[in-house]
Image: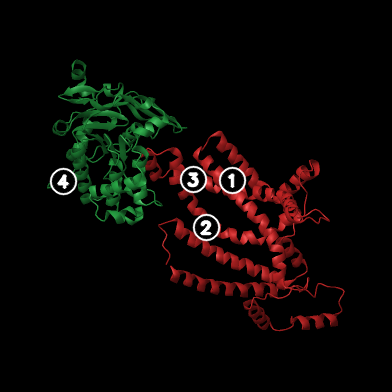
Amino acid sequence: MSTYITKRLIYMAVILLAASLLIFCLYALTPGDFISGNIKLTPERKAELREIYGLNKPLLERYATWMNNAFHGNFGYSLAQQRPVLTLFNDYIWNSFLLAAVSTFLTWFIAVVVGVVSAYKQYSWFDTLVLLLIFAAMSLPSFFIGLFLIKVLAVDFKWLPPGGMLTTGSNATGMAYIKEVIHHMALPVIVMTILGVGSLTRYFRTNMIEVIKQDYIRTARAKGLKEGKVLYRHALRNALLPAITLVGFELPALFGGSLIIEKIFNWPGIGQLYMSSFSVRDYPLLMGFTMLIAILTVIGTLISDLLYHLADPRVRLH
Amino acid sequence: MSALLKIEGLSTHFITEEGRIKAVDEVSLRILQGETVCIVGESGCGKSVTAMSVMGLLQGGLGVAIDGRITFQDTDLLSLNKAEIRAIRGHEIAMIFQEPMSSLNPVLTIGEQLIEPMMEHLKLNKKVARERATALIEQVGISRSKQIMNSYPHELSGGMLQRIMIAMAISCGPKLLIADEPTTALDVTIQAQILDMLRQIKEESGMAILLITHDLGVVAEMADYVVVMYAGKIVEEGEVTKLFEDPKHPYTQGLLRSKPVLGQRQEELFSIPGQVPNLLELQPYCYFHDRCEHCMAICRTQEPELGVVGHQQKAACWLYGEVAHHG
């Protein structure tokens, strides 16, 4: 087991090294940089700035500098905000994580329960209704459902605030602060859950339908077990197994933020930061963020492989 | 001896978009205490569906219509509610299946699966149930029982898994064991061992066996009484030696002729010409008429009834039409 993990960690390092090279090259090859976009600067000033930022150095040397700093836990300074990239991440990423964690939990919970019940009662009116809602949820674009709910719940009924994380000018602390944040995150969480729950419910429903047909479910019934035991002890665990693969993908998604949702609800998350950095070509921040997602993806994959080992006795890790 | 299980006029039909499939049609049979009854027939003749109907594993399914009476120890199984049939299932009537490899849950250990019926029906606690399960594993001829308890199904061979299935089935001391092609997926030497074991358990416990098979060798070895099914109906039934010595129905005759005999090498193995009829297109005639070498005019227009054709032997065939009427 420990040799397996060591081996995997070495692979991960190789993959990340390749990813870093790729990420660096892609951003370096994109025409234009942080300085060229600023029309107020004279050509002399631009050259001076490039000299200061080291942008006139050869590509490989710049990559080596970036990697060397990255190894020492330093992803550089954001050019636009003049603060360390990691400090910026720390300021924004937890806001994104808050939204993603709550909506991911809700999405999975609803998807498992509804998917299982729907599969068990396949072709019933409940199942038909679920299928209809799944396709409705999968077909709705995020910008539409987001704006629609803002219109209904925030503008017409005034139940929830339309955006932001805190009321403008609020100085709330302690419990009042927490309550205010919960109030503000309700709408984006609802939208993110609606957007994610459709495909995941369908996934669990399909898995469960497949498992219920298996011979060992017939055996469990032939033993005279109660239907609940047949479902939860014998069927559910087998139906959940393939979902472990998805768990690996959820990890980067938890920290990656959501470009559109954060924009619509004016949520101070990493997705917004990324978008605004993109328009000004703030490469250190962009590269740092892409690298972070790469690291999380690789870790997520390792976690899902280890989870398979725990959950499925047939899986042996070599 | 009184009948342990009595099936009277059982019809199990599947209602599909294409029409009504009469998988089992007006089947009647009875099993005495401690008797082994074999149902023989080709794939799709309704033998497994008969067994599943007795177990109540089809009831409540979509598009399943079950009619008739299944009496087990004076209880009509078809009139029981879900909880009542569940109390009998796995307790007084147990079942083993054709594919031992897929019949056990891949993510639970053998031990976890083996103790379930005992905890459910005999209300044993986990510790006692585990002790009994260990003893059962040894009873079905597997050594290292403690280790097997903690193994997963994929770590065992097909023959061993079928032994485990048998151990599970007999764990609550059933009066009737339904074995649905228990040896079909196993190789020949293992087949013989499994059959021997079933016979031995039967002798020790006095349980009855309803054995479903398409293998006439298995029938000859195990059965006291044989029921031959064709296209959802019983075409012939009788005491095993009688039926093998003097088969009356042309289908039974054909089945026996198509069995290879050791030491005799034929140019070509006999096979019954034609195909099993499509269960959707059945009309009131003898379902075997288009494959029968004795086919008469009446066979194409009227359905023969199951009638007595000899000592403890019945057949549904117009060849014995007169006999049936008077007998």
Q: How much space separates mark 4 and mark 2, taking CA atoms?
A: 56 Å
Q: Chain of mark 4?
A: B
- Which tint is chain B? green
Q: Which residue is mark 2?
A: A245
Same chain letter for marks 2 and 1: yes
Across and down, in percent, residue A99 comes to: 68, 55
Q: Is residue B121 left or right of residue A164?
A: left
Q: Residue furthest front?
A: A174
Judge by depth and name the residue closer to the eye, B87 or A40: B87
Across and down, in percent, residue A125 comes to: 56, 34
Secondary structure found at label 4: loop
Residue A8, above or below A310: below
Give the mark nearest the N terminus, 2 or 3: 3
Secondary structure found at label 2: helix
Task: Identify by letter the chain in red.
Answer: A
Graded by Cα atoms within 10 Å as few (under 14), some (14 to 19) or many (20 or more), the crowding at tag 4 reads: few
Q: Which residue is mark 1?
A: A110
Q: How much space separates mark 1 and mark 4, taking CA atoms?
A: 65 Å
> Measuring 44% from the left and 71% from the top, which residue is drawn there?
A3
Q: Is residue B103 visible?
A: no
Pointers 3 and 4 in contact (C-beta within 8 Å):
no
Q: Chain of mark 2?
A: A
Q: Chain of mark 3?
A: A
Same chain letter for marks 1 and 4: no
Circle 2: residue type: Thr
Q: How much space separates mark 3 and mark 1, taking CA atoms?
A: 15 Å
Q: Which residue is mark 4?
A: B266
Judge by depth and name the residue closer to the eye, B278 or B301: B278
Graded by Cα atoms within 10 Å as few (under 14), some (14 to 19) or many (20 or more), the crowding at tag 3 reads: many
